[in-house]
Amino acid sequence: MDSRTLERLAKLLRLANSANPHEAAAAQQRAQHLLDQLPPGALDVVQDPVRAHTDAPLETSRRLRRWRVALANVLGVPLQCTTYVQVGTRKTGGDRLIPVGRQKSVDTLRQHYQEWIPRIDWLTLEFCQGRDRDWTEGFRFGVLDAFTEEPPSPQVPALLPTQAMERSALEEFVASELNLKPGRTLHLLAEAYAQGRIAGRERFFPHGHRRNT
């Protein structure tokens, strides 16, 4: 189901609350007819729409660390969420990491984000003693790469119907509502990246399975 169908359903549900009883009844009937043709969960997607959660950033900092921005995006993929950096001003303060997605999904993303940061920090302390900033950053991005590796078996299943609806709504929102600019090119030390990838895979995913999101 595409975003236009979601918008049509949302409009019908709003009209169903009209003060005009005839208009409300007609809209309710059309909305129910449309819902009957849609997969379970469609109503939840409409009632909890995709939005940019500018009122509740994942993090605010004078200078956001690039690996944390990458972590948020990696964790957001299976949740049908994404993030972007809102550059700080005198009024807003530091840079803000803004999550984009449904409220329920963003709440889960926030929980995972807060859980994984200290775990990666501890792993970094263990393996990066005496290393400089560039080596440490390369290591952390290598750890994140372990998150994206496909398990050897079974194959990753296709998106469920409701997940596909969420993904479509997310992509439509990002394309139509957010004027995002491409990020800077990232240069990492190959040795540090490789070490981080190995350490992340062995410590967090020893059996080749993805994290439980």
Image: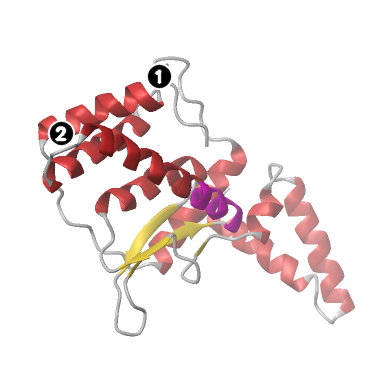
Span of residues in magenta: 103-111
Quadrant of res 25: bottom right
Observer-nearest residue: 36 or 102?
A: 102
Observer-nearest residue: 118 or 189?
A: 118
Q: Which mark is residue 42?
A: none
Q: Amino acid at mark 1?
A: Gly
Rendering coords of residue 115 (x, y %)? 47, 44
When the figure is inspected, residue 26 is found, relative to residue 107, above or below; the finding is: below
Residue pushed farthest right? Answer: 21
**Label 2, residues with CA under 10 Å away: few <14, some 14-19, many ≥20:** many
Q: Which mark is residue 208?
A: 1
Observer-nearest residue: 41 or 96?
A: 96
Rendering coords of residue 5 (x, y %)? 61, 56
Note whether residue 18 is visible.
yes
Q: Nearer the viewer, mark 2 or mark 1?
A: 2
Q: Residue at x 14, y 51 (%)?
A: 185
Observer-nearest residue: 209 or 195?
A: 195
Classify residue 148 as left or right of residue 184: right
Quadrant of res 201: top left
Q: Which residue is mark 2?
A: 192
**Overall secondary structure of the magenta section:** helix
When the figure is inspected, residue 194 is found, relative to residue 39, above or below; the finding is: above
Q: Provide the secondary structure element on which disc 1 rests.
A: loop
Q: Amino acid at mark 2?
A: Ala
Q: Residue at x 17, y 56 (%)?
A: 184
Image marks 2 and 1: residues in contact by CB distance under 8 Å: no
Residue pushed farthest bottom? Answer: 91
Q: Residue at x 44, y 22 (%)?
A: 209
As for residue 104 lying within the magenta part, the answer is: yes
Note whether residue 97 is visible.
no
**Label 1, residues with CA under 10 Å away: few <14, some 14-19, many ≥20:** some
Mark toward the start of the polypeptide (2 vs 1): 2
